Amino acid sequence: MRFVPIEYIKENSILGDTIYSVDGVLLANEGIKLTARLLNKIKENQIFTLYITDEHSNSKINRLIHPNLRNKAMLIVKEIFLAAGYRDANGQLKSKSIYEYMSSLNSIVDEILLELASKKDIPLEYIDIKSVENYLYMSSLNCGILGALIAMDMNYNYEMTKNIFLAGIFHDIGMALIPPDIFQKKTEFATEEKMMIINHPKIGIEFLKDKHFLNAYVKQATLQHHEKLDGTGYPLRISGEEINTVSQIVGITDVYDAMTSDKPYRRATTPHEAIEYLMAGSGRLFDSNVVSVFTKKINPYPPGSLVKLSTGDIAVVDEVIKGLPLRPKLRLIKGTEGNYSYEPLDLTINHKIFIDSLVYNID
């Protein structure tokens, strides 16, 4: 299966992965035909990218976490963020206690970490299907998961790995305290709105400062996750060693998840583009060791992806060789619809050809 923006999906394509609404309600099962009516329903739920499967790409993508477990965790994160950002009938912020959710959160994090530990050597190929409406909750959970994977590869112990997971979950809690019509806005922010977005780390730490059940790592990452090594980040504009490693880890996962997610004002970039951005900023914006560990986890061209080559040919990714994610084994697609044939091409051997871009259709 492969990840495709909805505008490229043809009617009656086969859905490659089950999708849910922001409330965790089933929208469509894996394997169903995507009729025009169903595609419209999916768009109405503000989901703009889907997995599909077809004759070119019917392979499965590695999942690090079972969908039911991920969905259960997302709903707990959602409850926490809704409690933090609760507003009365007049729209006034009246944050509720989040303590009552911590037992459930800790339990689900332990469960996810157990599953991740058994699969930590599997490359990250799967991108979560997010709606614009559930972006904040899914992104926070994803940053926790990605941070935990980095921590495991950096040989942190279980306690520290869990701290990083929780730091990822809570890093954007300040966004939950901003009126949703602002952070979900599709048009350009007014000056006051932009300042509110920029200050969400300060808003978040103000909310968390008296939450004694969350440790300093979580709180520091909430405040520092947008800081950059060269001092060009925000809100404090600190630099270098002033930014702790946990904040660096969470910040890098936040950038990657944000770039590969649909936003109200733009569509997602590809994993390859996000990796290129992180590598370009390595040592200048981001900790080079963390970038190196993280980018080695990502498989930018999962099996089933359609790619355009430097020769102009279209191919399907067949197999990704460990340590050589940009030089996979391919099948060149020949012929026309209904009469396709394939020719093998191994980019680990043929060094004159390279992948130019991801594509979503043959024609």
Image (cartoon, rainbow, N blue to C red):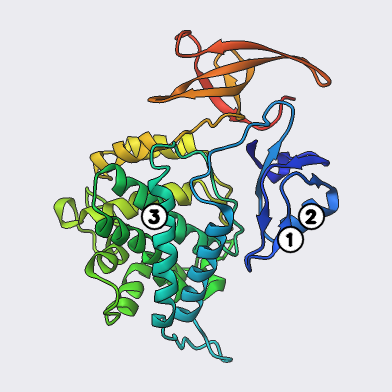
C-alpha separation, residue under disc 3 versus residue under disc 1? 34 Å
Residue shown at 70%/39% (left/top)?
Answer: 52
The correct choice, above or below, for 332 with respect to 298 in the image is above
- Amino acid, disc 2: Asn
Q: How crowded is mark 3: few (under 14 residues within 10 Å), some or many (20 or more)?
A: many
Instruction: Give the Cα distance between marks 2 and 3.
Output: 36 Å
Q: Is residue 277 visible?
A: yes
Circle 2 residue = 40
Vertical comparison of 303 with 334: above or below: below
Q: Along the polypeptide, which appears first: circle 3 or circle 1? A: 1
- Decide which of tag 2 and tag 3 comes sooner along the chain: 2
Q: Kindly identify which residue carries mark 3.
A: 113
Residue 182 position within the rendered picture, expressed as x and y whole percent measured from the top left: 52, 70
Q: Name the kind of residue labelled 1 in the image.
A: Glu
Front disc: 2 or 3: 3
Mark 1–mark 2 CB contact (< 8 Å): yes
Q: Is residue 234 visible?
A: no
In the rendered structure, the answer to whether residue 344 lies left or right of residue 283 reads: right
Q: Which residue is drawn at 57% across and 61% down?
A: 71
Q: Is 360 left or right of 116, judged from the image as shown?
A: right
Q: How crowded is mark 2: few (under 14 residues within 10 Å), some or many (20 or more)?
A: some
Q: Is residue 167 above or below residue 350?
A: below
Residue 162 x %, y %? 32, 59
Question: Quadrant of the image for the C terminus?
Answer: top right
Amino acid at pointer 3: Leu
Q: What element does badge 3 sit on?
A: helix
In the displayed orientation, state which residue is furthest to the left.
Answer: 241
Callout 1 secondary element: helix
Mark 1, residue position: 44
Residue 262 placement (x, y as % from top left):
57, 51
The crowd level at tag 1 (other Cα within 10 Å; few <14, some 14-19, many 20+) is few
Q: Position of residue 244 (x, y in %)?
A: 20, 56
